[in-house]
Amino acid sequence: MLDWTSCREVERSAEKVSGAWVFRGTRVPVIALFENLETGATVDEFLDWFPGVTRQQVEAVLEHTTHSLATA
């Protein structure tokens, strides 16, 4: 399991989406990015579908994931 606490572009609150990690300032769960990429969506499509999420946030989440997996 990834430790999202050090990724500044995400947040978690019991009041938002049942405590799931979401993109900061939105109600879009981080898992939605990975589910969409897994089914063949592009980052641009994801950003179109979830306009509250920024490219900077997506890039930070992907970088955090890559870094976390490389050091695991």
Image: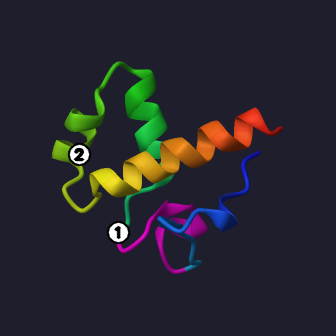
Q: Position of residue 63 (x, y in %)?
A: 54, 44
Apparent side of residue 29 relative to residue 18 in the rendered image (left or right): left
- Which amino acid is tagged 2? Leu
Label drawn at residue 26: 1
Crowding at dot 1, Cα within 10 Å, few <14 / some 14-19 / many 20+, comes out as some
Q: Tell me which numbered mark, 1 or 2, is placed earlier along the sequence.
A: 1
Give me the C-alpha separation between circle 1 and circle 2: 13 Å
Q: Where is residue 64 in the image (x, y as percent from the top left)?
A: 59, 48
The residue located at (34%, 19%) in the rendering is 40
Q: Is mark 1 on a helix, strand or loop?
A: loop
Above or below, comparing residue 26 to residue 71 in the picture: below
**Residue marked by disc 2:** 47
Above or below, comparing residue 10 to residue 50 in the picture: below
Apparent side of residue 45 relative to residue 62 in the rendered image (left or right): left
Crowding at dot 2, Cα within 10 Å, few <14 / some 14-19 / many 20+, comes out as some
Which span is picked out in magenta? 15-25
